Image (spheres, rainbow, N blue to C red):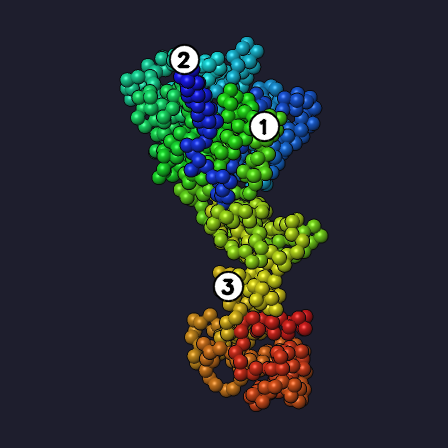
Amino acid sequence: MKKSLMLLFLVISMVLLSFNAAASPWKPYDHYIPAEMLISKRHLRGMWISTVLNLDWPSKETVDIEDSRERIEKSKEELISLLDMAAGMNINAIFFQVSPEGDALYKSDLVPWSRYLTGTFGQDPGFDPLEFVIEQAHIRNMELHAWVNPYRVSIYTNADTTASLNIPKSVYKEHPEWIKKAMSRYVIDPGIPEARKWVMDRVMEIVEKYDIDGIHFDDYFYYERTFGELDDKQTYMKYNPDGFSNIKDWRRNNTYILIKELSEKIRASKSWVKFGISPLGIWANQKDGYPDGSNTRSSVTNYDSAFADTKRWVEEELIDYIAPQVYFTFANSNASYGELTTWWADVVKGKNVHLYIGQALYKINDDSDRYFKGNNALKEFSNQLKYNVAQPRIMGSILFRAKNFTDSGKQQVAAAIKNDLWSTKSLIPVMPWKGGRAPDMPIWGKVETVSNGTKITWDNNEPNTCYYAVYRFGNDEAIMYDSNITAKNLIALIRKEHGQTAEFIDKKVKNPEKVKYMITALDRLHNESKGRIIAAGQSAYFLDVGLDFSWAVNAIDELFERKIVLGNGNGMFFPSENTKRKDFIIMVVRAFGLDAEWESNFIDVPGDAYYHNEAGIAKKLGLMPGNDENFYPEENIVREEMIVILLRAIAESGYNFEITSEDILRQYKDEGEISGYARAAVASMIKSGYIEGSNGYIRPKGLATRAEIAVILQRILNLND
């Protein structure tokens, strides 16, 4: 009896242990999966939009609308709705299927219009979907990658479909010798060189005609489930110049040639256009005799099923990114998510190739794997996205596919992505090998209260700027420009509109005194400039004129706008610095618009000095006190000397001033320190309202800072406008 009880206890214990192990598939990866989603300033967040079979767009109901204007309007509305949904989830890249079956969702000279636009192969839909989606994606600051299926001609081979293919520009009609059947579909034979050229010509037509950000292929290269189905032995015999000893290696070489030559063409045509592949999640299994393969047991692999040596493409840097479709859970015993993502991360290590992971959103509550079901699905998908962000060589995720975000069985996961996992905005990672450079930062900016929030306005004349990033910080919050943590402060991405001042209304802030903003400029490859700080009481043009100089901000900015002061050209004004005589005389000549024909200059003013002309004007007009032939350009200007020069400039310009008794000086405790030559000028400037003194002092022997001079100049100009 005791033996039986002991045996029963052991059995129950083993079952419980087994259950616990099975219930914790993420346990081996606990160290790599953060409890909370890490904030990442740079991470690609992509979404596929499938047009084949009208899976995502346009809907079949819209395609069936007979009135063409109504159909076009509805098609655009549906596409805008998908993009708005993506923008609301902080997605920053769209992978839009533009050629699913040797056809075109764009205006092509090479292939017919897609049947998925109107229901009829070759029928003009009345607008250009690719042009439209590029425009709409860019408005939302999303990259737009044109997704092409290189070899597929038709998913169906029935009589009606076959008959529909016999139209002008159809490859089925014009090159029937290229057509094969595989997996009960019509495909192009990849072993025929002319057929490969046709694929490349299609792609290059898109690259050269459209403002796309990338060309994207998925996993469909060779179609094989059972060997020999494609029936390309004759092609192998005819086109095997390198003498491959077996048809498998020859096929892999065919796909290699396509990728290599296409890569070269894209880079030569538009170096900024990215070229990426989203292959099957598994390159090859170790168990099948591939030591470099993954520890997986899959019957379908890139190397042996699609005859695509995707690992080689990465190693030779033929592509800019690879996005393996890791459509598995961590618990999958044949192909674990953790095993595959780690394997791919090792493949891209040290390569100029980004790794993005294709995520199986479509499998949520629609798959036999229990970890894609119910509450398990939420935990699984959350852990996958958290894991990706935590791995430095995984640069992003792409979700398959758009309409799945609205499926009833996927709302729990979709809500988690929107409200938690991707709740902050993220910039697309930079590919340094693609070129580009960070633009100059915005040249000015201002903050003002409006009825619906706080309005930030700025400008940037840099032609390299593509869009702007707007960050919001609390007044006491430190700005860590390059830190991931700044992603939580990133509140908007604004497309640059050429010839227009940019603006953004922050509806969440009613009192701009409590916050500060940083605006950066980015090029189309996402290289980011330094930040322009914009705050209430902050100069719109100078980084160092902040709240400490709130009394001078308006004056400094106005003088900059009038081109009287320019700063150092790098956003600095140095408001607290004393003003050298050479710089002061430039301000005076510019402010009063003085000019004179002069023949002799001060003897200590070099002929190539940047203030040479202004000093000559000052000498000719007698602006400088005394009769010295030296200008002393490097000496700092003292206040009483500044006042004398300003009064003489006012008189020369015809501006208003009053002559008064020196008795007016008695109100100042230090009036006895005013030099005799300056007393009348100081009295006149006080009477005219141009200078005021401070706390009962005039400080005649004090040095004048750049900020103080700006305030006085503004006062003189405004009183005479």
Name the residue rendered at 65%, 49% in the picture.
Answer: 508
On the image, the x and y values in percent for residue 123 come to 60, 22
Q: Nearer the viewer, mark 1 or mark 2?
A: 1
Q: Quadrant of the C terminus?
A: bottom right
Secondary structure beneath disc 3?
A: loop
Residue 35, image x, y percentages: 49, 39
Query: Which dot marks residue 699?
Result: none
Residue that badge 2 annotates = 226
Circles 3 and 1: CB atoms closer than 8 Å: no
| Rendered residue at 33%/14% (across/down) | 237
Q: Residues within 10 Å of mark 2 (few under 14, many from 20)?
A: few
Q: CA distance from mark 1 to mark 2?
A: 34 Å
Q: Position of residue 304 (x, y in %)?
A: 37, 20
Q: Amino acid at mark 3?
A: Met
Residue under label 3, please give it: 572
Residue lying farthest right? 451
The alpha-carbon separation of the residues under discs 3 and 2 comes to 69 Å
Mark 1–mark 2 CB contact (< 8 Å): no
